[in-house]
Amino acid sequence: MAHVFKLRARSRENGAIAATAEPLARPVGPELNGHTPAISVVLPTREEAENVEPLVARLERVLPDLPVEIIFVDDSDDGTPDAIRSIDSSRAVYLIHRRPADRAGGLGSAVVAGIRAARAPFVCVMDADLQHPPELLEEMYSEAMETGSDVVVGSRFCRGGDKGTFSRMRTALSRLSTRAAVLLFPTRLWHVSDPMSGCFMVRREAVDLDCLRPRGFKILLEILVRTPGLRVSEVPLGFGERNAGHTKASVREALRYLRQLGRLELGQLSARFGRFTVVGATGLVVNTLLLAVFAEVIGIFYVLAAILATQGSTLWNFCLTEAWVFAGRDHKLSGGRRAAMFFAMNNAALALRVPLLVVLTSGLGLNLLLANVLSLVALTLLRFGVADVWIWAKAQRREVESYSYDIHGLVTVTSEVRLPELERFLTPEAFGRASIRVRIGQIQKPAESNGAVAHNGNGGPPQNGNSSHNGNGHSLNGREPAELLSDLVPLRPSRSIQYTEGLAGFGFGVEISQVGERIEVIASPLLERSPHVLYTNVVEPILRWTFAAKGYALVHAACFADGDHAVMLTARTDTGKTTTALKLLDHFPYSFLSDDLTIVCPDGRVLAYPKPLTISRHTVAAVQTPLLSRRERIKLIPQSRLHSRTGRRLAFVLAKLRIPAATLNAVVQRLIPPPKYDIARLIPTARVTPEAKIARLVVIERERDLEQELDHDEAMEILFTNCEDAFGFPPYSEIVGFLHGLNGHDLKRAERDVVENAFASVPATLIASSTMDWWTRLPSLMASPIH
């Protein structure tokens, strides 16, 4: 039996530090002053005597306000156990020293032993040689808390990760082993870039340890493959240099890995075949019952009855096979093609059975009953092989890219779909925890018809963000640390809303969840092919209220600057802001900040939001030297017709008729994308300035001729009305109430306060023109004295 020691937290008596070790059946007792740890760190060791002390020293500095226990599982024959026992630490440290007879399975079984001994809801596994930075513990824990993930992987191969100083050969082998695993288990591993990582965090209750068969180094692979339904996320891992000792990688471990892959695949294959056989047995019962009904009850000729019964049992078998045998697999073929192939296979098998019986009885001289059994077994094996390899073939998963956008360091976005409107904010750096994360996935239709359904979970973050644990076991704010711990572990989104337009999963659909401080967005596959709609109708409304939550406002206004002084131009949608801005920039040396949305700071500054400009043939004709090709100019003809003021009005009419307007919009914009071009393509000499100070607000209108100063209240009402006008298309009206309450605040009030403060002393002017010559009047306003 393994020897388990508890190293008590250090106690100071007369200035001396006393550390005692006592054998325990498992690490239980009054450690951490009787309070349950938040995290258990499991460290498998083998001849790491020089590494354990600096490792614990670094772990002590991570998450100092949370109770953390450290569990060493040691397979050493040198002085490593003594080195662990001599560690002086303020944290609870445990040692499980395994005798040689108990070490079967190597590192994998050591990790399982550590997880069994752990008492925290989250268990972090990492190497003890300091190649896995202990500081990553905090990032993994935060990721698990915010996303509700069951497993958080420290990945060398995701964006921001670093494989370290591996040789080319070792890097190639690592990549090859990863791809081999993903190829064998695409459903479980397609979203994991580094399933071979030795650094990960797991929610203890999510894993059935009795189902694991650990052998060798790759315990994470074992967990991911043998545990269905895990929610997995990743954080980038920078693989460091070994502090001391020597690597345990060897040819023997490589062979262990190959055997592990084979064993995992064989286990999965056996389970599928067993389910397939059970389905076949139930199909035999169904076939017999149908044959009796058709032949005996209805009186159909027995040959025809047998054919009809076969079709009925085949339908039964197909439904069960689809729902049970290959459940959860991403299929290469569509459901209709799978059904057609399965019916063809079953009818062909029926035709093959008679010749096979003849061969076995007449040709080989076998008894008829034995031949019948052998024919059934042979055809079952054949049918399973065809079903597994061809009919329910695994879809080849593409590697999901992730695009990162950093908007002035205020809001960060990661998206599986490239968002052209945010191209100016694209950054090669990956974010550990972006403000908004956009993913593509299937959205299940809610119980109601078209519309939104909100869900409020009970696992949300604590309302009092100041609550924390002081690490000493004392009550904080009148509450025990164990109570605080329950607040610190939200395992599911605290709030969510869903909007779908049905259409069997092929239409517009989005699910928005608030997980901690992050907004999680799952968009239907249609939106992956229509990124402009994904951004404009989903991401942009979320950005508006995310900025409000951070103390800024994203307002509907163009903005340009003369030096440090900015003039904001607001109007109803399709009035002519873009044409006015382009003409102004084409004729005057002003700087560009935005033509549609501008970020307003409460201190009166504005930050650039230079989205691509949506233009028309009329807009292009307004500037002197646009860098558009002949093909792009020709495309503008249908684009201008469709994406025009008239087209927008038609879309709003369709939306009011309760037809799937958002779906139609996505399909149309997929077929004929809106004409969007960066400012540099339209006016090559234009300069984009990152920020300026608001000097004046200008409101422009059509249909009449007038110029007058506006009082503050009137100007603000016009500005807010114009902001709402820009966000009116579905699903905004269905989700805006949810977005107003992000983080439990009234963000509509917060946004208004930001704008009111920013424009408190800014003059406002209304210019109405029937000839739309606003650009000729604006220079005089920009040159007027600043109040």
Image: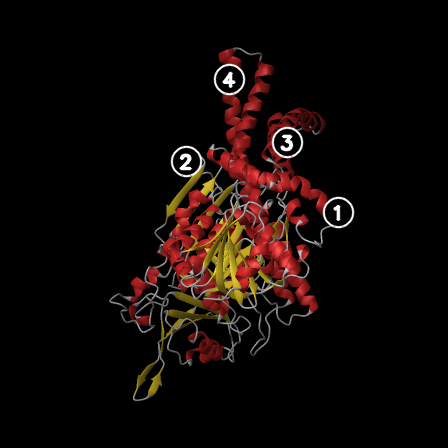
Q: Residues within 10 Å of mark 3 (few under 14, many from 20)?
A: some
Q: Nearer the viewer, residue 280 or 540?
A: 540
Q: Nearer the viewer, mark 4 or mark 3?
A: 3
Q: Is residue 615 above or below residue 46?
A: above
- Mark 3 or mark 1, which has the lower sequence index? 3
Q: What residue sits right under mark 3 in the picture?
A: 341
Q: CA distance from mark 2 to mark 4?
A: 43 Å
Task: Please state which amino acid type lies under the numbered disc 1.
Answer: Arg
Q: Which residue is mark 1?
A: 630
Measure the C-alpha gap from mark 1 to mark 4.
73 Å
Q: Residue furthest right?
A: 630
Tell me the distance, in whole angstroms, between the alpha carbons under discs 2 and 1. Answer: 48 Å
Name the residue located 36 percent from the left edge and 50 percent from the top edge.
457
Residue with the most extreme bottom position = 14
Where, by quadrant of the figure, is residue 61 drawn?
A: bottom left
Vertical order, 1 against 594 (above or below): below
Q: Which residue is mark 4?
A: 292
- For discs 2 and 4, the disc positioned in front in the rendered view: 2
Q: SS class of the residue under badge 2? A: loop
Q: Earlier in the sequence, mark 1 or mark 4?
A: 4
| Residue type, label 4 | Ala
Gap in Å between the C-alphas at discs 3 and 1? 49 Å
Percent across and percent down for residue 547 are 45, 58
Q: Secondary structure at mark 1?
A: helix
Q: Is residue 785 visible?
A: yes
